[in-house]
Amino acid sequence: MAYASSGHEQKPKMDMKKPVIAKILSLEKIHSGHLPMLSQSIDKAIKAVEAGNKEIALAELHKAQKMLATIKKSIGKHVKPKFANVRCPIMGSLINPDKVAKNLIRDYKNQKIAFCCGGCPIQWDKLTDAEKDAKLAKVKPKPVEYHSKHKMH
């Protein structure tokens, strides 16, 4: 026997204790699908704010955050960073990848390592591989994690 739908059935709730794992999207899918959806969600949030509807605005912003996290993770899988390190492995100074001169770069185990000044590559060259590995482990970028001030429930 078939039952008529009242339209008020409860949807199963998501288990918020399980982390949401973002799938890796192709660049084409990001460009043609997710970026337009992200833009629409932001537009809806703006209209909701202008109309004074906080709940809809927050829901759209949370949706936009999730899409942005998926896009960011996916792009990160397609784009290789310029250098394996974000800080100088010798001095610990922050590296600006756009301002590293060629003489401040070393190739090490198929990675480009950047240094902050002319003395650091010379010190690096004197280290053993084990010492280099230890120093490099301390200055590699941390994995990017999705976070927000607002918890999504």
Image: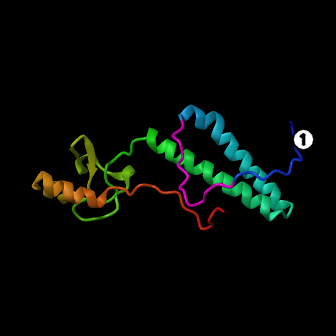
Compared across the picture, whether 33 is left or right of 27 comes to right
Image coordinates for residue 80, horizontal then vertical, percent = 39, 42
Residue 53: quadrant of the picture: bottom right
Q: On the image, numbered disc 1 is attached to which residue? A: 4
Dominant secondary structure (helix, strand or loop) of the stretch shown in magenta: loop
Q: Position of residue 23 (x, y in %)?
A: 53, 42
| In the image, farthest residue toward the front | 1
Residue 51 falls left or right of residue 92? right
Residue 24 seen: yes
Total labels: the figure holds 1
- Residue at 81% of width from left, 50% of height from top? 9
Residue 88 seen from this side? no
Q: Give 104 or 151, whichever is nearer the viewer.
A: 151
Q: Which residues are magenta?
A: 13-25
Direction from residue 79 to residue 131 in the image, left or right = left
Residue 17 part of the magenta-drawn span? yes
Residue 23: say if magenta.
yes
